[in-house]
Image (tube, rainbow, N blue to C red):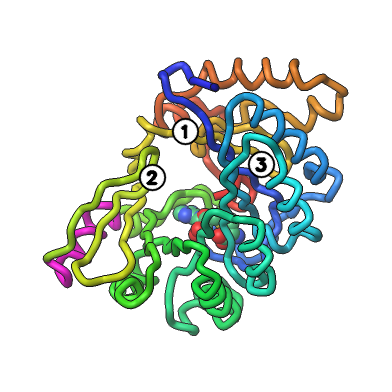
């Protein structure tokens, strides 16, 4: 079992399989001019499977496939199938924008995908276009319906942004009335490719989001959070689903963080807010054996920042990357 220098067990790997995306969400990347990487810079599927086995041997049992948008990478399903066959990896989760996902839902069910996080910031088609700069709401909705039909647990991720989707908070909450879905509101982070974060958005932190929901639903109740949960979770009496709030910018959950990340180029990050601490693709391509790579991983984990603030402070440069290059 991997344990970091602060006594936190690490058993969860977030794997960004591509930096490409078919949406252009303004809080994630600029509309134009984003430089996607040439394919040779990305880990191949074979390399990713090797890295996952290396982590599995070190005690990682849960992998989340993310990106970029996982379904824009060709042949993602055979990769997921092979990943599901790796010994000790017993939970595979997926984060997707849902645009291309619907046709693959039956196979995801068959592969035993544990749950899917679907990113959706509004239920209004025009606003969807304004936020994502693409007119794809209907396809995302199709994916949502298919996930429900196939009884794959769904969590909806909604980034909360002042002057953009505040009036969508209550309709998103209402979605959990008749449907067994976890709707989670995320504080906006500065990973938009420019490092800036709108001052007004900073105000929409966890307490403010909760207070806003409480005003409409004063009897909303706190429920117990799962271990290592990044969301604070709530139930509204009579509602089938649940509500969560992720204090991603306030960073109040670092104390129980059990996750590490691999970027599409093989960069190993021990904190979302920190820099790459090791490049595993380089080690693989330089011909190092698994044991050597494992030693390097263990060594990086023994120098992990205590929290996202310390990780940010330790950076050699300011945050200016897009979430699509890290894997949100
Ligand atoms: N393409 C997939 C998707 O849209 O779910 C996976 C990658 S996306 C980068 C993962 C998550 O990161 C999405 O839920 C997205 O909303 C979130 N995200 C991206 N940029 C963010 C930001 N600046 N602040 C908060 N969340 C962000």
Residue sitting at the far left = 218
| Tag of residue 263 | 3
| Left or right of 189, for residue 36 | right
- Choose the circle earlier in sequence order: 3 or 1: 1
Q: Quadrant of the N terminus?
A: top right
Q: Crowdedness of circle 2 by 10 Å Cα count: few (<14), some, many (20+)? A: many
Q: Is residue 295 above or below residue 114?
A: above
Is residue 213 on the magenta stretch? yes
Q: Is residue 17 magenta?
A: no
Gap between marks 3 and 1 measured at Cα:
17 Å
At x 41% / y 19%, what residue is drawn? 6
Instruction: Give the labeled residue for mark 1.
Output: 258
The structure residue drawn at horizontal position 81% and vertical position 20%, both measured from the top left corner, is 289
Spot occupied by residue 164 in the image (x, y as percentages of width and height): 39, 71
Whether 293 is drawn above or below 15: the answer is above
Question: Which secondary structure type mostly characterizes the magenta part of the structure?
Answer: helix
Of residues 146 and 185, the one drawn nearer to the viewer in this rendering: 146
User: What secondary structure is found at the residue carrying circle 1?
Assistant: loop
Which of the two labelled residues, at mark 1 and mark 2, occupies the earlier sequence position?
2
Q: Residues within 10 Å of mark 3 (few under 14, many from 20)?
A: many
Asked whether the residues under the numbered discs 3 and 2 touch, taking CB atoms below 8 Å apart as contact, a structural biologist would say no
Tell me which corner region of the image, top left, top right, bottom left or bottom right, holds residue 262: top right
The residue that appears at 49% across and 83% down in the rendered structure is 125
What range of the chain is rendered magenta?
203-218
Evaluate whether residue 269 shows in this view: yes
Question: Which badge, 3 or 2, comes first in the chain's sequence?
Answer: 2
Q: Which residue is mark 2?
A: 230
Q: Position of residue 123 (x, y in %)?
A: 43, 79
Looking at the image, is mark 3 or mark 1 nearer the viewer?
Answer: 1
For marks 3 and 2, give the one nearer the viewer.
2
Instruction: Specify few, some or many for label 1: CA neighbours under 10 Å numbering under 14, 14-19, or 20 or more.
Output: many
């Amino acid at each position: 079992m991997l344990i970091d220098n602060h006594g936190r067990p690490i058993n969860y790997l977030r794997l960004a399989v591509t930096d490409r995306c078919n949406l252009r969400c303004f809080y994630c990347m600029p509309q134009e001019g984003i430089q996607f990487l040439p394919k040779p810079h990305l880990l191949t599927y074979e390399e990713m499977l090797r890295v996952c086995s290396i982590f599995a041997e070190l005690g990682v049992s849960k992998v989340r496939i993310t990106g970029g948008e996982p379904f824009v990478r060709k042949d993602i399903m055979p990769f997921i199938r092979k990943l599901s066959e790796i010994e000790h990896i017993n939970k595979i989760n997926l984060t997707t924008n849902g645009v291309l996902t619907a046709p693959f839902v039956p196979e995801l069910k068959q592969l035993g995908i544990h749950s899917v996080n679907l990113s959706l910031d509004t239920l209004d088609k025009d606003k969807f276009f304004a936020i994502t700069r693409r007119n794809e709401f209907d396809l995302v909705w199709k994916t949502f319906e298919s996930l429900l039909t196939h009884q794959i647990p769904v969590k909806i991720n909604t980034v909360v942004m002042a002057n953009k989707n505040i009036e969508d908070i209550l309709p998103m909450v209402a979605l959990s009335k008749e449907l067994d879905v976890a709707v989670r509101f995320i504080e906006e982070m500065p990973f938009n490719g420019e490092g800036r974060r709108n001052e007004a958005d900073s105000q929409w932190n966890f307490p403010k989001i909760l207070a806003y929901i409480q005003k409409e639903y004063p009897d909303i109740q706190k429920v117990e959070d799962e271990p290592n949960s990044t969301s604070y979770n709530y139930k509204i009496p009579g509602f089938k689903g649940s509500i969560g709030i992720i204090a991603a910018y306030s960073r109040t959950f670092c104390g129980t963080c059990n996750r590490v990340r691999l970027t599409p180029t093989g960069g190993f990050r021990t904190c979302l807010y920190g820099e790459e601490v090791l490049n595993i693709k380089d080690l693989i391509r330089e011909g190092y054996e698994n044991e050597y790579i494992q030693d390097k991983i263990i060594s990086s984990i023994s120098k992990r920042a205590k929290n996202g603030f310390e990780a940010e402070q330790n950076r050699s440069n300011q945050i200016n990357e897009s979430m699509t290059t890290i894997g949100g």
